[in-house]
Amino acid sequence: MKYYMPVKLYDCADCVAKNAKEWTSKGTRALLVTGKHSAAANGSLNDVIAALLENGKSYCIFDRVEENPSVETVIEAAHFGYEEGADLCIGIGGGSAMDAAKAIAFLMKRKERFAKEGAPAQTAEDEAHALYDAGEDPAALPVIAVPTTCGTGSEVTGVSVLTVHGKKTKQSIPHRIWPVIALIDGKYLSTASKRLIADTSVDAFAHLAESFLSAKADDYSRAMAVEGLKIWGGVKDVLTSDKAPDEEERALLMRASTFAGFAIAQTGTCLPHALSYPVTYAMGMPHGAACGYFLTGFIREAGEEDRAKLLKEAGFENMAALEDFMRAVLAGYEVPRDMLQTAYDSVVSNEARLKSCRFAVDADVLARIVFDR
């Protein structure tokens, strides 16, 4: 067995300010990678800027990262950051911002290397190809991750998932780009909507379940998944409650997401995520909700012992309790039959995906996961 986790993690109130001397030392001019609104609304952007200025560092902002960021956006941001002379990328937001920051940091380092070598300017096509060329040098600028949602765990993984319009889906780049420091503070959930918290928390649950049931799971990854399931299970009822999560619940939701990140960093995801990508691309369904749509069917097909342990650790008495919970938390989402067929078709011939689980999956099992609601 092996375990690799190079990210230094701070999980506490006001961790951005409390650890500013350390993380601001990773560069001299930071590119802040974020979306248009949420980081400003929840205070995370202001906290990062204040810490940079207090420690004598400059910054520039790219705030046009969309949900499920595209290759084109990453290329645009990399050009902007390079022209601005940034030597550090800070992803502030949900998985979209953090995944984008990793890919941007990779492209900026590549541009830096090419400029030093005096090579010809790279076209957008060259850069898009480089993002998905496994043979490329994976070096990247340092990345700092400041998560503001409780789902992706991207702050502690080397994964960057981008939208590839040419393929009408989402796809991980092959390069593993790990943040050097992750700064986790539950207060950044205080302005998030109930819908956003629910959708992203379902994503965290999917990560935990998929990692626990992964063919690549070992004692280390399963220990992380079990601990994450316990934390998530202890706070999950807030997702179907009328009240907003309090300070402690916000911290626990964020922590569960980070443990889920620890787990998938070792195993990767499997069937629910693979099935979700065409649904998210075609329908615009939030990523976590799309994963959750296939999650109960996936867990139902697991071996009896694994299924029982997963349900117990997550605080569900039985499959019926899980199904009731998922129906409640995903209320309002519906995937039409033709879209389910598209999701099924995208996976059924992918031998690696079918073999990614601890239990046997063939075309019939996959059909039950996809179509049996």
Image (spheres, grey):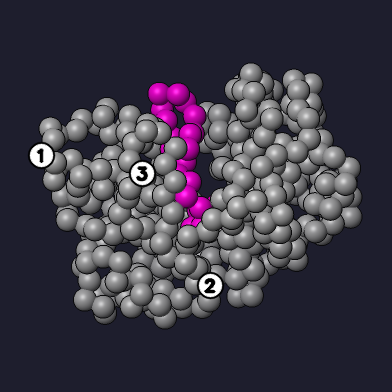
**Residue at image point 48% right, 34% down:** 171
Pick whichever, 23 or 243, lies toward us.
23
Provide the secondary structure element on which disc 1 rests.
loop
Q: Measured from the top left, where is residue 73 in percent x and y? A: 32, 40
Asked if the magenta segment contains residue 90, the reply would be: no
Pick whichever, 133 or 147, lies toward us.
133
Q: Quadrant of the C terminus?
A: top right
Image position of 212 (left or right of 160): right
- Location of mark 2 (residue): 11
The amino acid type of the residue labelled 2 equals Asp
In this rendering, the answer to whether 14 lies above or below 220 is below
Q: Is residue 115 visible?
A: yes
Pick whichever, 123 or 142, lies toward us.
142
Q: Residues within 10 Å of mark 3 (few under 14, many from 20)?
A: some
**Residue at image point 33% right, 58% down:** 142
- Location of mark 3 (residue): 138
Please report whichever mark, 1 or 3, sits nearer to the chain's N-terminal start: 1
Image position of 350 (left or right of 62): right
Measure the alpha-carbon separation of dots 1 and 3.
20 Å
Q: Do residues under tags 3 and 2 come within 8 Å of each other at their CB atoms?
A: no
In this rendering, the answer to whether 150 lies above or below 139 is below
Asked if the magenta segment contains residue 172, the reply would be: yes
Q: Residues within 10 Å of mark 1 (few under 14, many from 20)?
A: few
Image position of 247 (left or right of 164): right
Residue depth check, mark 3 versus mark 2: number of the one nearer the observer: 3
Q: Is residue 371 visible?
A: no
